[in-house]
Image (cartoon, rainbow, N blue to C red):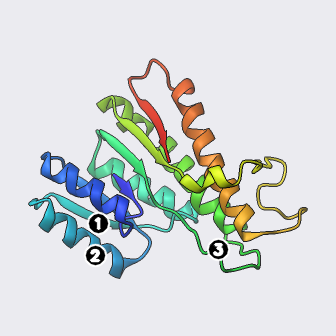
Amino acid sequence: VITGASSEGARAAGVSAARAGARVVLISGHPQRGTAARDEVAKRGQSSEVTLLIADLSLQSSVRELGRQLLTEYPSIHALIHQGVHHQLRKQEREVTAEGFERFWAHNHLGPFLLTHLLKEALVKAHGRVITIGSTRLKVYPRITVYLDDPGMERRSYSATRAFYQSKLAQIQFAISLGRQWAGTGVVAKALS
């Protein structure tokens, strides 16, 4: 299962998995771009076992429905790759989802966090892997902090750049924490940047 289907990294991971004989499930919030990615992965991976599911990772209701679909169709999941990212840094105004969460925080951290926990049983069953893709640019912002008391930056001066990198740092911290929390389950959690 790979989120962020239209990204270059997700397509490359999908092609590699397809070539290795895996059933590949791509997740995208954009039907047209997701379909193009699915078709590319199937063609380059020489596989008819490539599926596309549409979900908005910034909405918990959408993530819950996605989790339900995945568990119904795939009771055993060998890999969950969090490649999906919301990164519209040109928007300087704070954007809030219909569920009341700041959009970077909702899409880049809360969505992957929730999806991982919803799929725990299927990941444990397969002794699966949870791979979280961070951002190499976190090194450029060494003072970024995750404000757990104000993750949506409602009480702080808002910056789209700071909100984005805070959400990506939280994602990396979650992956590290998950490795400890799920120790002994057979699931391996890794963070890459």
Alpha carbon separation for disc pair 1 and 3: 27 Å
Task: Say which of 107 and 76 sits in front.
Answer: 107
Alpha carbon separation for disc pair 2 and 1: 7 Å
What residue is disc 2 on?
35
Q: Vertically, is 164 above or below 18?
A: below
- As drawn, is 60 to the left or to the right of 124? right
- As drawn, is 74 to the left or to the right of 114? left
What residue is disc 1 on?
52
Alpha carbon separation for disc pair 2 and 3: 25 Å
- Asked if one can make out residue 190 in the rendered structure from this viewpoint, the answer is yes
Q: Residue 16 at what x, y percent from top left?
A: 21, 51
Q: Residue 192 at what x, y percent from top left?
A: 47, 43
Asked if the residue at tag 1 contacts the one at tag 2, i.e. Cβ–Cβ closer than 8 Å, the answer is yes
Q: Amino acid at mark 2?
A: Thr
Task: Name the residue: 49% across, 21% down.
Answer: 183
Circle 2 packing at 10 Å, graded few (<14), some (14-19), many (20+), is: many
What residue is disc 3 on?
89
Task: Name the residue: 52% across, 28% down.
Answer: 179
Task: Name the residue: 55% across, 33% down.
Answer: 178
Q: Could you tell me which secondary element the residue under label 3 belongs to?
A: loop
